[in-house]
Image (spheres, rainbow, N blue to C red):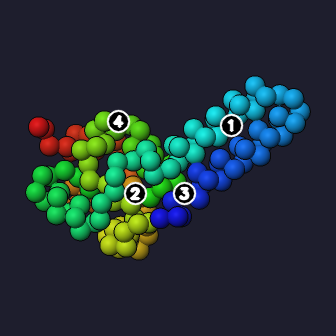
Amino acid sequence: MMRAWILPMLLVLCGSVVATGLIFREKPGAAAVLLLVFVLLAGLHSPLVFPRSIGALEAQRRSAVDGRPVVFWRPGCKYCLRLRIRLGHSARQLHWVDIWRDPAGATAVRAANHGNETVPTVVVAGRPHVNPDPEWVREQLPSS
């Protein structure tokens, strides 16, 4: 769990250090703007922008019942972030599994990717798809 927060914490820390330097140079406006940018970047790279993760076994069980895809992801992955942002509200309809928090999820991803933990891996109807186009993923959602 802690590993997921390392990058966001480093971004906030670096932003704070740079902003402090700007304050000492008597540029408080620039310091505030820069700190805000670093905090926003930290937020984007944190687990907070993703729907709540569940375990791989539970995600697979739910997917078998409702037909929704399972997304295996990890914090700090720019491709996972791209998928999440481009899916918009549709992302909440998917089952998200954080492979850093769930060993079974990491095992499932390695099995689908020849031993590599390549994410995002989206499983639709039992078939894994590595880093698929977000529009394609949206099309795989069952119509309600």
CA separation, marks 3 and 4?
23 Å
The residue located at (59%, 59%) in the rendering is 6
Place of residue 53 in the rendered image (x, y in percent of width and height, measured from the top left) = 34, 57
Q: Is residue 89 left or right of residue 30?
A: left
* Mark sitting earlier along the chain (3/4): 3
Which circle, 3 or 4, is nearer the viewer? Answer: 3
Asked which secondary structure carries label 2, the reply is strand
Assess disc 2: are there few (<14), some (14-19) or many (≥20) residues with their C-alpha within 10 Å of its C-alpha: many
CA separation, marks 1 and 3?
18 Å
List the residue tagged with mark 3.
Answer: 5
- Is residue 121 among what the camera can see? no
- Label 1 sits on what residue type? Leu
CA separation, marks 2 and 1?
28 Å
Q: Is residue 83 left or right of residue 10?
A: left
List the residue tagged with mark 1.
Answer: 35
- Label 3 sits on what residue type? Trp
* Mark sitting earlier along the chain (2/1): 1
* Mark sitting earlier along the chain (1/3): 3
Quarter of the image where one finds residue 136: top left
Report the number of numbered marks. Answer: 4
Q: Is residue 129 left or right of residue 18?
A: left
Q: Are marks 2 and 3 in contact (CB under 8 Å)?
A: no
The residue located at (41%, 66%) in the rendering is 101
* Mark sitting earlier along the chain (1/4): 1
Q: Are marks 3 and 4 in contact (CB under 8 Å)?
A: no
Q: Are marks 1 and 3 in contact (CB under 8 Å)?
A: no
